[in-house]
């Protein structure tokens, strides 16, 4: 029996530095569409969004961060790899405690066994693919960088 689709709670962290944000490029293997997305992941049962961000960034980058600051919530309904998806995303802002990370052009991350390359990009450098989830650009423009 197929699993019933569900809404997935997610937490994403926007790291900002000199007008750029840290994003990973993704690609839908079904239709070839590319996109940019900040780092983060699922929120586990009993875990707050801020706790999820601290855990996810440690798991993906092995990096410690400052206390995450909540920026807002976005809802995203989309199709990925031919399947409907529905996410509620808590969006946070934080700083890396290791300031050297800000000087790297690329930051290597891991999602399980999958290697991810995140890059510092200015919003205008993302014209070849959208920043997701939808509404994130507007949310960031409305929130001052600390």
Image: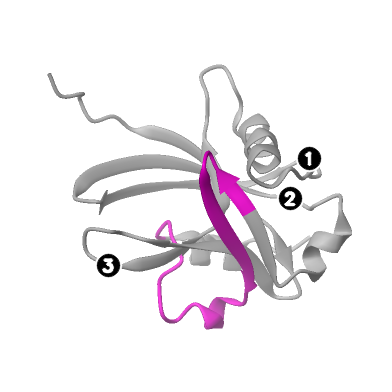
Q: Residue furthest front?
A: 113
> Left of 54 or right of it: where is 116?
left
- Of the residues under marks 3 and 2, which one precedes in the sequence? 3
On whether residue 132 falls in the magenta region, the answer is yes
Question: Looking at the rendering, which quadrant does residue 64 occupy?
Answer: top right
The image position of residue 68, as x and y in percent, is 72, 42
What count of labels does the image hold? Answer: 3
Image point (50%, 66%), residue name: 138
Query: Per the image, is 145 magenta?
Result: no
Density class for disc 3 (Cα within 10 Å; few <14, some 14-19, many ≥20) is: few
In screen coordinates, is 59 left or right of 84?
right
- In the image, the segment drawn in magenta is 109-134
The first of marks 2 and 1 along the sequence is: 1
Disc 3 versus disc 2: distance between alpha carbons? 31 Å
Give residue 109's position: percent from left, percent from top. 62, 51
Binning the other alpha carbons within 10 Å of mark 1 as few (below 14), some (14 to 19) or many (20 upward) gives: some
Residue marked by disc 3: 32
Give whichever of 66, 24 is nearer the camera: 24
Vertical position of residue 34 compared to residue 115: above or below: below
Whether residue 131 appears in this view of the structure is yes
Residue 94 - label: 2
Residue identifier under label 1: 67
**Residue located farthest toward the left when viewing the structure as drawn:** 1
Taking the spot 20% from the left edge, 23% from the top edge, the residue there is 3
| Percent x, y of residue 4 | 20, 25
- Judge depth for marks 3 and 2 and give the one in front: 3
- Position of 75 relative to 127 (above/below): above
């Amino acid at each position: 029996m197929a699993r019933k689709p569900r809404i997935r709670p997610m937490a994403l962290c926007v790291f900002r530095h000199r007008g750029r944000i840290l994003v990973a490029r993704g690609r839908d293997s079904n239709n070839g569409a590319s996109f940019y997305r900040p780092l983060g992941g699922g929120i586990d049962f009993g875990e707050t969004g801020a706790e999820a961000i601290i855990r996810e960034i440690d798991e993906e980058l092995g990096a410690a961060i400052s206390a995450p600051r909540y920026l807002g919530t976005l809802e995203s309904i989309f199709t990925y790899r031919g399947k409907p998806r529905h996410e509620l995303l808590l969006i946070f802002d934080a700083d890396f405690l290791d300031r050297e990370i800000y000087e790297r052009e690329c930051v290597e991350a891991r999602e399980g066994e999958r290697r991810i390359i995140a890059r510092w990009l200015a919003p205008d450098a993302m014209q070849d693919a959208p920043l997701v989830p939808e509404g994130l650009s507007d949310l960031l423009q409305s929130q001052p960088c600390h």
